Image (tube, rainbow, N blue to C red):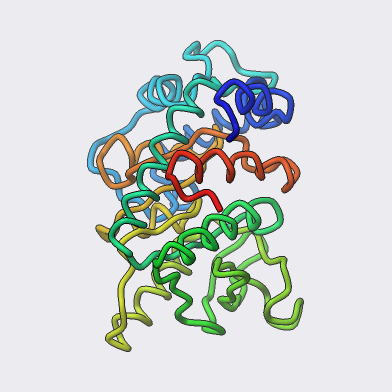
Amino acid sequence: MLSTGALRAHLLAARLAGPVATPRETSLRSYRLFAARDPRVLLGLDPERSWGERDLLGLMAEKCGVSDDPGHVSGPDVIDPERTLVALGAFGERLAGAARRGAPVLFGTGHPHRLLGFYSGLADALSAAGCLVLTPAQGRCVDITTRFGVRTYSIDYVRGVALVREPGVRVPGSATGAHTHSPLPVRAVLEEIVGARGVLPELVVGDHGWVCGAGQLGIEAIGLADTDDPALFVGEAEGRVSVAVPVDDAVRSDHYRPLVRYVLNRAALSQ
C-alpha cells in the first residue's frame, strides 16, 4: 500500500505538484485563449457559460491551487498536492464503480510519451477485473489541424490505450505517438462504434481532447490535466467531466507509476 504521505512526498519530489515546470506565462495564455473560445484550448468542450480570464483564474486557483493574483505573471506555476490527492481519490472511486459494473471503458492519451504507462496500468487492472477495454477504429485516419497545417494521423492502441501517430513514422503497436490536444480522435472512435453498432464506453479515461470530447458528448470522463489545461476543469465545474486531476502532465513517464499504485489501491483493484 502506498500511503497518502508517501505519495504527497513523491508528488513534490518529482515536481508533479508543488512548483511545476509549466510556466505561469503559458497558463495565463491558455486562460486568455479559452476566454476567447479558441478551439485549440477548448479541447472539444463547448462551455455553457461565458468564462472570462478572471473567472478562469479563480477556477484554476480553486481546482489546482495556482495563484489567483492576476499580477503574478511569471515564474513556475504551482499545483497544490492536497488538491491532487483529493482528485486522485475521486478518480479511484470512478474506476472502482466501473469495475463493480463490469463497464466498458475507453482509454486515450494525447501525451503518449509521458502518460502511456499510467493509463496502460489502469487498463490492465480494469481488464483483469472484468471490464471490457475498448479498442475500436484501429488504423482509422483523422485529419488534425496543427501549427504546421492539417496533418493526417492514424488511431492506434498500445496495451489498451488509444493514441494517434503519423502513418509511417512508427509501426503500429510501438510505444510512442504524437502529442495532441484534439477531440477529433475520440469523436472518430465513437463514430466508428456507433456505425458498427458496437458497445459504447460507459467511462473514458485520458487527457486533453479524449476527456473533453467524450464529456461533451455525454459520456462519463475522467483524466489528468496541467495548469495550462483549463478545459478539463471547466468541464468538471459544468458537470461534463467527472474528475479532473491537477498534475504536471509532462514529467518523466516513470514518475507516474506511484500514481497508478495509489489509484488502484483506492479503487481496491491492486494486483
Residue 74 coordinates in the image, percent (x, y): 66, 19
Give above or below for 48 relative to 54: below
- Identify the residue shown where x is 43% and y is 44%: 267
- Identify the residue shown where x is 59% and y is 76%: 156
Q: Is residue 32 left or right of residue 234?
A: right
Residue 254 coordinates in the image, percent (x, y): 74, 46
Q: Name the foreground residue: 25 vs 149.
A: 25
Q: Is residue 113 left or right of residue 150?
A: right
Residue 178 coordinates in the image, percent (x, y): 67, 64
Q: Is residue 181 left or right of residue 268?
A: right
Quadrant in which the N terminus appears: top right
- Identify the residue shown where x is 71% and y is 56%: 113
Q: Is residue 245 left or right of residue 153?
A: left
Q: Name the foreground residue: 118 vs 264.
A: 264
Number of on-image labels: 0
Give above or below for 24 relative to 173: above
Residue 197 coordinates in the image, percent (x, y): 27, 86
Give above or below for 185 relative to 194: above
Q: Name the foreground residue: 154 vs 15.
A: 15
